[in-house]
Amino acid sequence: SGPGTMQSPTMRYTCSFLFVVFGSLGLAAASSDVVSTTPILKVIEMLNGMLVKGKQEKHDEQVQFTAYRQFCDDTLAEKA
């Protein structure tokens, strides 16, 4: 830590943990006798899948809301 850098112990712990995890992934990928999918890689794949699914659901909701809003605007214009 430099003189202008202040990090909480939790932040330092989290950064250290992530460094160890991702460093381990690099070592595991470099090893020739490691099974192709480690538990950590499965978790990362699952999180990426959740991200893709969440983005698709958000898009679907935006489309549905736009159609509903158009219906409301059209109905309001008819009644006016």
Image (tube, helix red, strand yellow):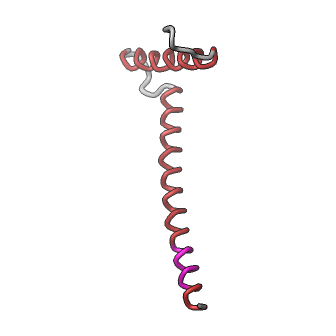
Count of picture labels? 0
> On the rendered structure, is 27 left or right of 58?
left
78 vs 6: above or below: below
Task: Please report the residue visible at 59 percent of the width from the left and 15 percent of the height from the top.
Answer: 13
* Residue 12: image location, x then y, percent: 57, 15
Q: Position of residue 45 (x, y in %)?
A: 48, 36
Tell me if residue 73 is in the magenta stretch.
yes
Prevailing secondary structure of the magenta residues: helix
Relative to 70, residue 55 above or below: above
Percent of width and height locating residue 49: 49, 43
Task: Say which of 28 and 73 sits in front.
Answer: 73
Residue lying at 51% horizontally and 8% vertically, measured from the top left: 3
Instruction: Report x, y in % for residue 4.
Output: 51, 13
Measuring 52% from the left and 38% from the top, which residue is drawn there? 46
Query: Which of the pair 27/72 is nearer the observer?
Result: 72
> Residue 56, relative to residue 50: is it above or below?
below
Viewer-proximal residue among 40 and 5: 5
Q: Is residue 17 magenta?
A: no
Please tell me which residue lies in front, 37 or 46.
Answer: 46
> In which quadrant of the rendered image does the C terminus lie?
bottom right
The region drawn magenta spans 67-74
Q: Residue at x 49, y 66 (%)?
A: 63
